[in-house]
Image: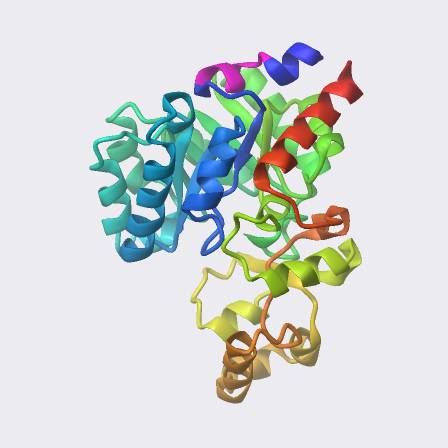
Amino acid sequence: MIDALTNNRFVSHFGLTAPIALAPMALATGGELAAACAKAGALSLVGGAYGDLEWTRREYSLALDALSAEASALARLGCGFISWKLAEDRSALDWVLDQEHQPTAIMLSFGDPSGLALSITDRDIPLICQIQAMSQLPQAIDAGASVIVAQGGEAGGHGLNARDGRSTFTFVPEIADRLAAHNPEIMLLAAGGIADGRGLAAATMLGADGALVGSRLWATRESLAPAKAIAEAVRSDGNSTARSSIFDILREKNWPSEFDFRALRNDIHREWEERIDDLRESPKPARESYRDGVLNQDYTRAHVTVGEATGLIYKLESAGDVIRSMNRQARQLTA
């Protein structure tokens, strides 16, 4: 099992030292975090997310500059986007693709990747597709994905809605079996609830080649997440989160109905849990309260984007220390 962690095909293909990929989290996975994870041996995906060109240009350029003197780390840098937003405006993706340094991978999540995939795969850039249901797998395969990310409902931020979402523990092996039988060349990453070496080791035991890590790397020194928000996550346990559309309504994010959002279940969330339809119909006062909460870093009203793994985050650390600790613990557990 040691070889499954240190010399597997995911590690070998991307020149990694740990079978870990940094999740491209919107407004959190900036250039500093991506560079730190790449230097620590992980596949690093800048959070291009909603496709804001100015933000993507700034943060991706920051990562390029930080890694310019380390060729091996630079070769681990890529970017990730939300598919349904790129369908509206793909200028940020096109900018990344046009850079002199070709990204080592592009990740697409949440929506049909078909209309975007050729511009990525025609450049021989590995395409990573994140899915949340078995029905999405054929679409990702047909788009030419080199890597599938199987995201369980435990994950923070966006995922399949609370009714239809799957558990990482059952979803990953089902995808692994399907790929092994029909598309064994495609690599698989597990996502959702993986925050330490135990989760990383478990992912490989379930048939994954590695793990996409979000919440644990969100709560690091290099993250763009506000320090007060991270402190709230550190104080919370896994029962403190909830998945709903409330924060998307408050933030005026027009997400497709099949997806919703996991974050800490704070006062403003509890206020609307039984009245989501009312919130949709008359959102203005709640939105004003939410915006004021964000402005004042009042996390009884502003959101804290973490998943159930928040109960496994005990302190603020550097991203490099998190990756090395996860990798070391996983090796010890599988020795």
Residue at horizontal 66%, vertical 52%?
Answer: 307
Instruction: Give the extent of the magenta segment.
Output: 7-13
Picture quarter with the C terminus: top right
Percent position of residue 210, x then y: 60, 26
Residue 203 part of the magenta-drawn span: no
Percent position of residue 219, x then y: 62, 51
Q: From the viewer's perspective, is 86 left or right of 27? A: left
172 vs 124, nearest the viewer? 124
Residue at horizontal 59%, vertical 22%?
Answer: 209
Picture quarter with the N terminus: top right
Q: Is residue 106 visible?
A: no
Percent position of residue 291, x then y: 50, 79
218 vs 205, nearest the viewer? 218
Image quadrant where residue 255 sits: bottom left
Residue 8 part of the magenta-drawn span: yes
- The kind of secondary structure the magenta stretch mainly shows is helix
Q: How many marks?
A: 0
Residue at horizontal 72%, vertical 50%?
Answer: 315
